[in-house]
Image (cartoon, rainbow, N blue to C red):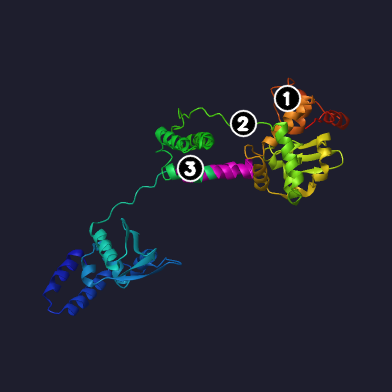
Amino acid sequence: MTNKELNFLQNCLQYLPDEDMKDQALLIILNAAADGVKLKSLQNQSKGILANKTGNLTGGKIQFTMKEIFEMPENVKRLFIINERAVNYRIVRGMYQIRYHRDGYNIDVASKDLAVVKKKFLDALAKGATPLPKKSKYPLFREFAQKWLDYKKPTIKEKTLHNYTMIVDRDINPSIGDMRIDEIKREDLQNLLNKMVENGKQGSAQLCKTMLGSMFDLAVEDYDIKNPTAKVVLPHYEEKRGSALTKDEERNLLKYCRENPKKKNLMSAIIILLYTGMRVGEFKTMTHDDKFIYCISEKTRKGYLDVKRKIPISPMLKKVIDMVDFDAKELKEPAIAYAFKVILPNHHVHELRYTFITRAKECGINPEVVMLMDGHKQDHDVLTSRIDRGYTDYSDEYLLKEMQKFDYEL
């Protein structure tokens, strides 16, 4: 049956006096028209569109009258006839939703009223088919950022990956995550970083700028786009540096540790950090014997062999050894940092490391030995080169002798 013949028969229906007869006759005619195509093929084509794909969501079917189907575009009439004159809807957060992506139609309508969502759907059909948007070869920034994180994961430590992920999720994606990477301009990145600085996140902004530079270096190679990070600037940021404790503060710290035996684990951690110069993140790797304390350097890059350091037990540590429980290494970093902040609110736990290094130099210990104990690769006070240090292997006797100098009055 041709479209011309179908239209002629449909026009004749208006002369039937009974509405039920009209519906019945129209259904017969449209079914006859449907016989002109391979019905099974048509059903297969429509199966994925009108099937209920709601999963755990609730939903149902919206039924259409024959009059409503009669007014539909020709290319979709048959689909609704063979699917019992219905289209599926789902309910999401109290909204009725109909999604129809087929035959050039790209329809997503929703309403709290079922009758309204039905009308919206019919109106969208009446407007005719609209081409689906052409998929871009350029990913959204949030997709590319995740690929970058996956790319970095094998080469960085878990803590670093956590920091990168937090910056992406908290600061970058809310601003540019839904933009394609080829759409992002220098102004977008500059505004993002400026906002971070205005919110007091200048340190995070510096890290964010470095991350964006690395991401877009990769994007330039993969997608041949211009690098929008060029000429993005940030105000000069002077990282806040800590300071060594004064001897009065050191004395008060030890006094507090002695007066709080119930907190021996935490006090032990603080004393060990004070008299070894370990980073708080290295504390959990600590082992010891009667002469040395050992730890794994926190600054070893992922994939490289662990760098094990040994720190002779100093006269200062021996003076308070009765307050130390070496099993305290099971403590978590935040607990140690918080306990120290309670005692000395104007300092942070990393300043125990500053204190050890400062006292070691004040006591006249060989600066090269200080570097070996604290795990620094570079010190402006040490004139020997890194190559020379690689050829230097101090004996235990020499290290113990140097550490005997670590003795002072409080």
User: In the shown orientation, is residue 168 left or right of residue 107?
Assistant: right
Spatial CA distance of label 2 from label 1 is 25 Å
Q: Nearer the viewer, residue 205 or 327?
A: 327
Q: Categorize mark 1 by other alpha carbons within 10 Å: few (<14), some (14-19), many (20+).
A: few
Q: Name the residue under label 2.
A: 241
Q: Is mark 2 on a helix, strand or loop?
A: loop
Point out the frontmost of discs 2 and 1. Answer: 2
Q: Is residue 311 magenta?
A: no
Q: Is mark 1 on a helix, strand or loop?
A: helix
Q: Does the magenta stretch include residue 158?
A: yes
Q: Nearer the viewer, residue 95 or 228?
A: 95
Q: Earlier in the sequence, mark 1 or mark 3?
A: 3
Residue 338 picture location, percent across and down = 64, 45
Residue 120, compared with residue 137, is above or below; it is: below
Query: Which stretch did the figure color magenta?
Result: 140-165
Residue 355 picture location, percent across and down = 71, 32
Looking at the rendered structure, the kind of residue marked 1 is Arg
Q: Name the residue under label 1.
A: 386
Spatial CA distance of label 2 from label 3 is 25 Å
Residue 277 picture location, percent across and down = 73, 35
Q: Which mark is residue 171?
A: 3
Q: Is mark 3 on a helix, strand or loop?
A: helix
Residue 96 picture location, percent across and down = 34, 65
Spatial CA distance of label 1 from label 3 is 38 Å
